[in-house]
Amino acid sequence: MTRDFDRVVLVVVRTVTTLTRLLDILSLISPDRRLQLVFTYDAEHPAHLGDGVDAALRRLNVRTISWEEATKTAFDLALAASENDRLAELDAPTLLFPHGIGYQKYYPGGRVTSGMDPEKLLDPLGEVVPAAIALSHAVQREQLRAACPEAAGHAVVVGDPCYDRMSLSTHRVRRYREALGTGTRKLVVVASTFGKRSLYGGEPELPQRLLGALPYDEFQVALVLHPGVTAAHSEFSVHGWETDAMNAGLVVIPPDRGWQATILAADCVISDAGSSALYAAAVDKPLLIATSGAMTTVAGSPLAMLIDAVPSLGEDLREQIVSVMRHHRSGVHRPIVERAVESPGQSASLLRELIYGQLALEPPAPRTYPPVLSPEPPDGRVAAFVAGILDCELVRFPASVPSPRLEFSHVVAHADDAELHQLDGADVVFTDSRERLSELLAHWPLARLAVAPSARGCLVRGRDGSEFELDGDDPMRLASEAYLSVVRRP
C-alpha cells in the first residue's frame, strides 16, 4: 500500500441500478483520505438483471474483489442497495439503501415489497442483518414494520440522495441540453422501467412514433431505459431495435450515465410506473403516463398516487405534449412528492451522520453532492429529411420514420451520410463542399437542386445552372426553403 487509511468500506453491487444509487452516496465519502473503498459483486449468484455490472465497475476503475474474498475479510462498514445479496455472510455492519425513490414496488408475483423482504432481512437465527435500513420518508417505517417487524427498529430516515443531487444540479440544465444537442427545441424524454408491463415493454414503438409526429426543428426525443432493460436484452439489441429512430435523431441514454441530467433537461417526460416518473415529478417536469400502473406498484404508495393523478398519453401525440407543457403548473406534483421524500435537501448531512457514526469517525468538513454527470453527446446527425408545409409552416421530419402527409413534400438528403434509397428519391442533395454541386446534380438526375453551406447560410444550384444564396443558420433547413421557393415560383 502507498498510503495508510483508518477504515475500509465495502461497496456491495448487485445491478447497475444499485451501483448508480450507491455512487450518489459514495460521492459524499470518497474524498475522505481516511477511507479505502473496495467493491464486490456476487458473480456466483448474480441478479436476474445483473448483466453489465462487471463492465460498469471496469469503467469506474475501482478496486474490486471477489465475493469469496469479501466474505473472508473483515470490513469496517458495508454499503448495499439490495437485500437480495447474501449480506449475512459479510463480516461488517451493513447499511442497506433503497435503489429507487423509496419503496414503491412489489416483487413480481406477490405482495412482498422490494427492499423489505423478511427472508433476506433476517438471518437463519432470526437476527436482523443490516445495521441500519435507510428510508426516504418516515411513513415507510410502518411499511417496514408490516413487512418485517423485527427490522423496524433498524430504520433510519435519510431522505433521497438521488433527488437531492438532481436538485443541486438544476443550474446546469443549459450544459446538459448542450451535451444532448437540444438547442432551442423542446426535449421530450421517454423514460421506461423494465418488464412486459413497462412503457418500453408495451409500447416499444413510441419513440419512433414521436419522431414521426413531432417536427424536428421544434422537438428532440430522448430515450431513458431502466438498466434492467439492457441487462436482459443488451445495449447492442436495444440499439439495433432503435436503428431507424436513432438515424432520425433519437438520443438513447446509456444505462449507467446521464439519465438524471436528461430528466433535468427535459421539457416534458413520458413515463410509466417506474421511479423515473417520481423523479420527474420531484424536479417539477410536465408529465404524461404512457401505461397504467403496473401490478407491482405498491397500492396507496406515492407512485400509485402519481399514476392516478397524471394524464395518460393518448393518440394525438403532438397536441397532447404541447398541451401538457402549456398548462403545467409549477409545484402541482409537490404534495405527492412530499409523501415519498422527507427532508428534501438534507440527505447529505443525514447520510454523513449515519455513515460516520457507524465508522466511529469524526466527520470531515461538511460537503454536499456534486452535480450529476452530463449525458454523452449523441453520435451522428440526421442525414435525410422529409419536409413540406403543414398548417402553413415549413416542417421537417427525419426520413427514416413515417411522418404526416405534407403539402409540397420533398426529400433533402446528405450526399455522404444519407442511405442510398434516400438519395435515389431525393429532390435536394446536400453536400458539405460547394465544389461538388455540379457533380452531384449529374450523379443524381432526379434531384432538382444541390445545396452546400456558404458564409451567409447556403448556396443553391439548380439543374439549369442558376445559383442563389439564402441567409440563415441551418443550411439543411435552408435547402428546404430553397426548394419551396423554386416549386412555388409563379
Image (spheres, rainbow, N blue to C red):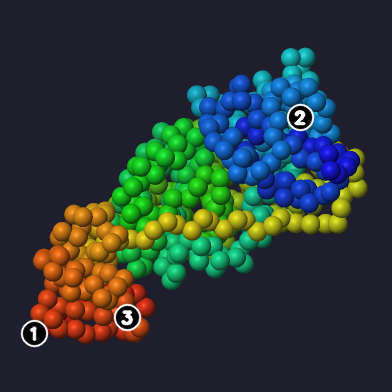
Q: Tell me: residue 231, above or below residue 71.
A: below
Residue at image location 32% in from the left, 80% down from the top: 454
Q: CA distance from mark 1 to mark 3?
A: 27 Å
Q: Is residue 316 left or right of residue 263?
A: left
Query: Residue 300: where, in percent of width, then height?
Result: 56, 39
Kind of residue at disc 2: Pro
* Depth check, front residue: 41 or 137: 41
Kind of residue at disc 3: Ser
Few, some or many residues within 10 Å of mark 3 (<14, 14–19, 20+): some
Q: Is residue 356 left or right of residue 20?
A: right
Counting residues from the start of the chain, the first of labels 2 and 1 encountered is: 2
Is there CB contact under 8 Å for labels 3 and 2? no
* In front: label 2 or label 1: 1
Q: Tell me: residue 300, above or below residue 43.
A: below
Q: Tell me: residue 35, above or below residue 332.
A: above
Q: CA distance from mark 3 to mark 2?
A: 66 Å
Q: Which residue is mark 3?
A: 454
* Depth check, front residue: 213 or 489: 489
* In front: label 3 or label 2: 3
Q: Which residue is mark 1?
A: 490
Q: In what element is the residue under mark 2?
A: loop
Counting residues from the start of the chain, the first of labels 1 and 3 encountered is: 3
Query: Residue 97: where, in percent of width, then height?
Result: 69, 38
Kind of residue at disc 1: Pro
Residue 74 seen anywhere in this rendered image of the structure = yes
The quadrant in which the C terminus is found is bottom left
Q: CA distance from mark 2 to mark 1?
A: 79 Å
